[in-house]
Image (cartoon, helix red, strand yellow):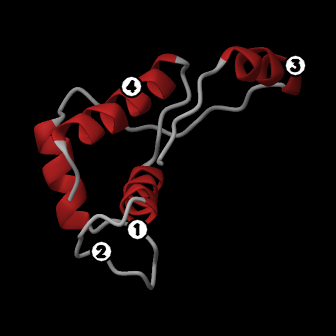
């Protein structure tokens, strides 16, 4: 799929979002993985019909990176969101 450095960047990105108390759902991580592969022309077996990495990939990913936790993002008032977003770092899939 991708190099170990790119996977490490992907894992670090998910952890940085987690630290900001947002977290990712299963679908969001699968969708981000699909986007990463599509943007960088990585060979993969993901279906393009639903634009998500497969459940098998996801289970393997969580087994490898068991320190990633899943959750739904909680509501934040717009004022707090703007404050966090102004300090946030973006993740580049390019």
Q: Label 2: state its secondary structure.
A: loop
The residue lying at 64 percent from left, 20 percent from top is 88
Q: Are marks 1 and 2 in contact (CB under 8 Å)?
A: yes
Q: Secondary structure at mark 3?
A: helix
Q: Is residue 28 visible?
A: yes
Sequence-wise, which precedes: disc 1 or disc 2? 2
**Residue farthest to the bottom, as pictured:** 49
Judge the density around disc 3: few (<14), some (14-19), many (≥20) Cα neighbours within 10 Å: few
Q: Residues within 10 Å of mark 1 (few under 14, many from 20)?
A: some
Q: Which residue is mark 2?
A: 46
Residue neighbourhood size for the residue with mark 4, other residues' Cα within 10 Å, grouped as few (<14), some (14–19), many (≥20): some
- What is the x, y in percent for residue 93? 47, 47
Q: Nearer the viewer, residue 71 or 53?
A: 53
Closer to the chain start, of discs 2 and 3, is 2
> Percent x, y for residue 33?
37, 55
User: Can you identify the residue that label 4 sits on?
Assistant: 15
> Where's residue 3, x and y in %?
19, 45
């Amino acid at each position: 799929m991708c190099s170990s450095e790119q996977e490490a960047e992907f894992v670090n990105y998910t952890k940085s979002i987690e630290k900001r108390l947002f977290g990712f759902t299963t679908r969001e991580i699968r969708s981000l993985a699909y986007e990463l592969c599509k943007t960088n022309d990585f060979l993969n077996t993901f279906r393009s019909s639903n634009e998500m990495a497969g459940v098998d990939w996801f289970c393997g990913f969580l087994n490898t990176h068991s320190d990633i936790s899943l959750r739904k993002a909680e509501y934040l008032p717009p004022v707090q969101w703007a404050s966090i977003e102004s300090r946030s770092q973006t993740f580049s899939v390019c």
